[in-house]
Amino acid sequence: MTPKQYKARFAEPTPTTSDSGSQGGDSSLKPASDKGTKEADTRAGRALAYALDIRKFEIELYWKRATYFWAFIAAAFAGYALTYKNAADHEPWLSLLFSALGLLFSVAWYLVNRGSKFWQNNWERHVDILEDMTLGPLYKIIATNEESNIFTAAGQYSVTKINQLLSLFTVSIWVVLFAKSLGPIWTDREVDGPKIAVLTVTVLGIAALGRWGKSNLGHNTTKLTERTFDIEA
């Protein structure tokens, strides 16, 4: 879609009547500026308000998701720490199980961070275009000031990018712990069944997240079904 086509989608549908006074007339699309309509009442103005609201909602969900995953990852860390010492002598696969859970949740957190950033970027780009059609480039103009103290000066850092790097670091920590807990999966020609099972499920789980966890951006077909009921007399 070109910028011209995008803007045409938000142009105002305006019925016009021919100068001859004929009945019916045709329908054309005119920008809001040609009609004297208030910017907030135009299609582009309303779309801009929706885009800003949804962007705000996506940011709120972003941090709620981060809290959700941190809770599971912290629980996995605690479980790994509790079972590591005892599992070395009794059930070696228990620490492997908790490290597998931690690894899986960390990978999921990293992918969710990227997905959240994707949709946040989507609405921010809508704002970039729609504000040019209504109130002007307020969102795109960055106002900065110089501060001599490097420790208190504002920094041009992306909160979401830092969070993604942090989640990726957490993934790397769990990879090390998982590899350490895995150890030898066969000794004296005997295969360690539980370790093989945990390893297989973990690899398949991570592969499934990467393969089927993406949003569908193409054409979707939706079926609508009306639910009916009768009131018994």
Image (spheres, rainbow, N blue to C red):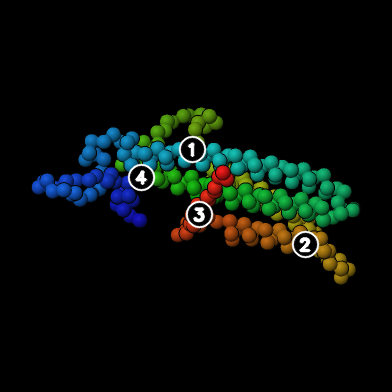
Q: Is residue 52 left or right of residue 116?
A: left
The amino acid marked with disc number 4 is Ile
The residue tagged 2 is 197
The residue tagged 3 is 225
- Of the 4 image quadrants, the one containing the C terminus is top right
SS assignment at label 1: helix
Distance between the alpha carbons at the discs numbered 1 and 2: 43 Å
Which of discs 1 and 3 lies nearer the camera? The answer is 3
| Residue 140, visible in the rendered structure | no
- Of the 4 image quadrants, the one containing the N terminus is bottom left
Q: Residues at badges 1 and 2 in contact (C-beta under 8 Å)?
A: no
Distance between the alpha carbons at the discs numbered 4 and 1: 17 Å
Q: Is residue 205 left or right of residue 93?
A: left
Q: Residues at badges 4 and 1 in contact (C-beta under 8 Å)?
A: no
Q: Earlier in the sequence, mark 3 or mark 2?
A: 2
The residue tagged 1 is 56
In the image, residue 14 lies at what x, y percent?
Answer: 24, 44
SS assignment at label 3: loop
Q: Which mark is residue 122?
A: none
Q: Earlier in the sequence, mark 2 or mark 4?
A: 4
In the image, residue 115 lies at what x, y percent?
Answer: 54, 50
Location of residue 191 with respect to 26 vertically, above or below: below
Which of discs 3 and 4 lies nearer the camera? The answer is 3
The amino acid marked with disc number 2 is Ala
Distance between the alpha carbons at the discs numbered 2 and 4: 51 Å
Q: Is residue 203 left or right of residue 230?
A: right
Residues 165 and 215: in front is: 215
The amino acid marked with disc number 3 is Thr
Residues 230 and 208: in front is: 230
Location of residue 96 with respect to 120 vertically, above or below: below
**Residue in the image at 54% along x and 48% along y:** 229
